[in-house]
Image (cartoon, rainbow, N blue to C red):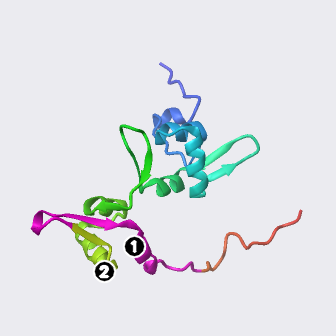
Amino acid sequence: MAVQLKHDIRGYHAGNISKRYLREAEAADEFELSSNEVIAYATAAGALYRLPRTSLIHRERMETFMKHLYKIPISGKVIEKKYVRLGEASVIYSIGRHRMIEMARAAGAVYKLGDGASGTVLVNLDIFDEYMEQFREMPVMMKHPLFNGKETEE
């Protein structure tokens, strides 16, 4: 009994390949937006790459840009969230819940609605983003850079 090889490498992965770049139609399906909206958001995110006959969208940049956006189910409009609950903020920034509380309080981005322990705690994302910038590390020069910025002539 002979084993038949698949014609494409994707056959071995069963479609579980995570693409880094999406075409316009694929991004529209994935983000559930019209193609015009996808182009507008990709341009704003700096994720749009225009090639001679193709437009590609960098998936990671687009997802990072759209993490604060929320689609209203009834109207289908996409809005940007300015305030999120504490649990959602900890998911957005991949920070534990207790650490998120400490950092949001230090940033002055906490808004508490209601009385006592049953109140809702909201985090202002704009203020928290500004606070997070102080932890950004500056790039370090590599000992042997991969690209030195000079064009080679052949």
Q: Residue at horizontal 32%, vertical 73%?
A: 109
Residue in front for this viewpoint, 51 or 3: 51
Q: Is residue 130 left or right of residue 146?
A: left
Q: Secondary structure at mark 1?
A: helix
> Height in image: 137 above or below 75?
below
Query: Quadrant where the C terminus lies?
Result: bottom right
Which residues are drawn in magenta? 113-140
- Could you classify mark 2 by the number of other residues whose Cα lies within 10 Å: few (under 14), some (14-19), or many (20 or more)? few
> Height in image: 135 above or below 51?
below
Q: Is residue 92 left or right of residue 64?
A: left
**CA separation, marks 2 and 1?**
11 Å
> Height in image: 13 above or below 60?
above
Q: Which residue is mark 1?
A: 127
Q: Residue at horizontal 30%, vertical 80%?
A: 106
- In reply to whether residue 82 is colored magenta, the answer given is no
Q: Amino acid at mark 1?
A: Ile
Q: Secondary structure at mark 2?
A: helix
Q: Amino acid at mark 2?
A: Ala
Residue 106's label in the rendered image is 2
Residue 7 in the image, given as x and y percentages of width and height: 59, 29
